[in-house]
Amino acid sequence: MRYSAFKLLIEGLRGQSGWKPVWRDPEPQTEYDYIIVGGGGHGLATAHYLAKIYKKSRIAVLEKGWIGGGNVGRNTTIIRSNYLLDGNEPLYEFSLKLWEGLEQDLNYNTMVSQRGILNLCHSDAQRDAYRRRGNAMLLNGADAELLDQNQVREMVPFLDFENARFPIKGGLLQRRGGTVRHDAVAWGYARSADSHGVDIIQNCEVTGFRVEKGTIKGVETSRGYIGAKKVGVAVAGSSSRVMAMAGLRLPIESHVLQAFVSEGLKPVIPGVITFGAGHFYVSQSDKGGLVFGGDIDGYNSYAQRGNLPVVEDVLEGGMALMPMIGRARLLRMWGGLMDMSMDGSPFIDKTPIEGLYFNGGWCYGGFKATPASGYVFAHLLATDTPHETATDLRLDRFRTGAMIDEKGVGAQPNLH
């Protein structure tokens, strides 16, 4: 069923009786050509592009819970491509371009809102770093503008510009950045993948891999064994546990990242704002709630909930940036499970097991990379060669010394 204004009109006249389920709920087949482990944004996007762009068939997505119950529904919805290093920036710019045409591609309202993202700077050295990053963005085809204090003040006059510890001296603006409705992304990709023949199998947990003579043969699941010629794993914070079933150890730690929503307020935040003297980022949803977050909890965990010290730290950052936030009430909070790599950059690569592929280590960048991650992972699965924007995202880069240290903090994910 294709959505359109005409379809909405007709269904309104006939009492909304003609709508069909957005995707099927099939029983798993005994064997597939491609199995994608993980029904989050990256897994569903991979299946969509594998079927639509690369014309592959006999594809299944296996999700241990329900569609939208993982990280794809547990984030702050920000999209951007304001990265610095060559190993990352082309991929995120590719992703932003895919976001810009996503609703037409999926025939689904994912609520892409390119309201802009503003990274504030609070020192001369930070302004120099932003100038460098902005130039790298421009060289990779992205947009970037370096703003002085007066330009920032005109855009967001409610910030605390005269803060003695953190004076706002300017900012780096990417106007094409913004937000997207996270649940709609999952639903849109699931609907499109299903329409191209992909089996989306929920409540189907992978419990093991069947490997014979170094080649993948299929997966053991809570619903029985399923054979496969190729298996792609995209399970975010569960990456280490899932890949350990295949005997593989990853350079990844799992941490909790908390997110928060305030009560509904009148429109005040024009786009996305990030605090440069701490880790705090905020936007405003269409319902009026302030959506914000900050640092990960600094301990390893597989729980989708966090602890109060990080809540305090995030709110302190918000108060330092915009004291008026102290008058708003916190409505709800949640945690997502982050797969933190040792250099702050992801992996999309083959594994030493023939036919087994891995996509993970996204740290803070998972949601914004969803379209490109799915596209390039589908390219790898279909062609056995890396996409041109993902040639550096190799699993062996720590052994070879070819790290992509985007944050400059080395092997300390708790500091990313």
Image: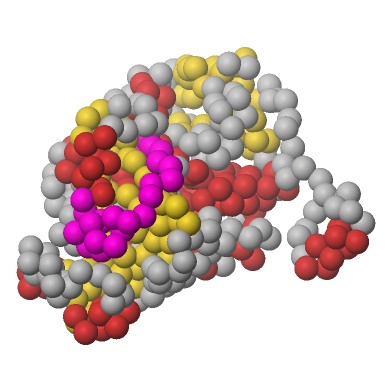
Residue 387's place in the image compared with 209, above or below, is below
Residue 358 is situated, as x and y percent measured from the top left of the image, at 41, 36
The one of 149 and 85 positioned closer to us in this rendering: 149
Q: Is residue 15 left or right of residue 41?
A: right
Residue 371, position as x, y percentages in the image:
49, 55
Magenta stretch: give its range. 316-338
| Residue 229 can be seen in this image | no
- Identify the residue shown where x is 29% and y is 62%: 324
Position of 407 with respect to 249 (left or right) is left
Up the image or down, 100 lies above or below 240; here it is below
Q: Residue at x 92, y 56 (%)?
A: 14
Residue 68 image-quadrant placement: top right
- Residue 127, picture quadrant: bottom left
Q: Is residue 326 magenta?
A: yes
Residue 10 lies, with reference to residue 225, above or below; the image says below
Residue located 66% across and 58% down the image:
108
410 or 295, nearer to the observer: 295
